[in-house]
Image (cartoon, coloured by chain):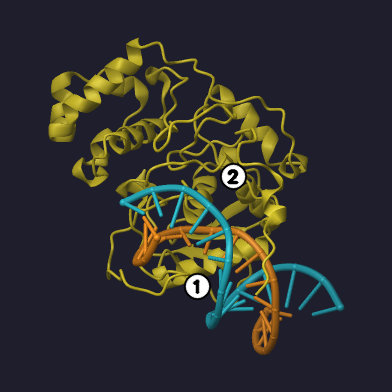
Chain colours: A yellow, B orange, C cyan
Amino acid sequence: MVRQTSCIMSVPPSASIDSHVPAPWSAPYSCTDSSPMMPGYTGRAWPQDTQPQFWSKFQVWEWLQQTLDMHQIDATSIPFQNFDIDGHQLCSMSFQDFTQAAGSVGPLLFQNLTDLKWSGQYGIEIFGPLDIKTEVDEFQCPIPPFREDFSTWPPTDLVDIKAPFPSSVALTSPTPSSPESKRPQSRPQTAPLKKHNPRGTHLWEFIRDILLNPERNPGLIKWEDRSAGVFRFLKSEAVAQLWGKKKNNSSMTYEKLSRAMRYYYKREILERVDGRRLVYKFGRNAQGWRETDK
DNA sequence: TAGTGTTTTCCTGTTT
DNA sequence: GAAACAGGAAAACACT
């Protein structure tokens, strides 16, 4: 089969992609300009340009996730529910509190937070020059509300460039149910999600993050049944464009996006919702979408 | 370098 | 008829 990929590369990977759409925790971003990046881990997903005191719960989790990632610590090793707190509460935690909440990882987290508090890292320019205008910017609704949100939600994004990022941590990775390590190459995988997450955020996480941030979701996707995890695309092409922008792929369409979504059926990240167009449902291997997950 | 995981792309056929 | 869905096939790409 002759495949044409040249169009995808119309935007050089090194191009500066603006990061307008923040995500709560799972979308690690990298430097958004073309500045040299370290190989491997370079992106910082937690809100480093905001003082920890002002972090939201999501941002706290994000910081947790990235800190663990940075130190290659399995996220399952600490109870995230112990950090169901905002930045203010986080900053008021003592060393003992951290140890109590995160066990052996506590000191590390405490140290990291202390460093963050005092290192003057806040204010690092996260967002590169917003000089690249893409098709997504033309949408009437998606971008402006996100931009307005910068004051309160600066760090991560739903439309960052594809980042050389380490695997996402278990917080967003389903528990493997039936290990299926052997399968033909170049076939859509059917194994449960593992830590390997070469492209940063997974599509389903991207979708989830839009859903979880109504204020940053200007009518793109909406919950049909929040408790059941059923949601519906309102502006399917706009979502696809956003996803494409995030992946630096201007040729992304809803058709392609939906194909990727369908692959999630086998992995039970999504479940079919028969007879309803543009409607999907999170499956048992999708995590982080429930209200109780927050 | 091979293997793996996660898309991405293209396609054909079906359903709404 | 158009849009969306379904799923096979294969390639791309980042990571281990």
Residue drawn at (46%, 38%), measured in percent from left and top? A28
Residue identifier under label 2:
A246
Question: How would you rate the neighbour count of disc 2 (Cα within 10 Å): few for under 14, some for 14-19, many for 20 or more?
Answer: many
Q: Say whether residue A9 is left or right of residue C11.
A: right
Q: Is residue A239 above or below residue A97?
A: below
| Residue A292 is at least partly visible in this image | no
On the image, the x and y values in percent for residue A15 come to 65, 35
Residue drawn at (59%, 44%), measured in percent from left and top? A246
On the image, the x and y values in percent for residue A271 come to 46, 69
The disc, 1 or 2, on the residue closer to the chain's N-terminal end is 2
Parent chain of label 2: A
The residue nearer to you, when weighing A84 against A21, is A21
On the image, the x and y values in percent for residue A65 come to 33, 37
Q: Which numbered disc, 1 or 2, marks the residue closer to the eye? A: 2
| Residue A122 is at least partly visible in this image | yes
Residue A5: which quarter of the image?
bottom right
Looking at the rendered structure, the secondary structure element under dot 2 is: helix
Q: Amino acid at mark 1?
A: Arg
Parent chain of label 1: A
On the image, the x and y values in percent for residue A94 come to 19, 18
Residue identifier under label 1:
A272
Residue A6: which quarter of the image?
bottom right
Q: Is residue A251 above or below residue A2?
A: above
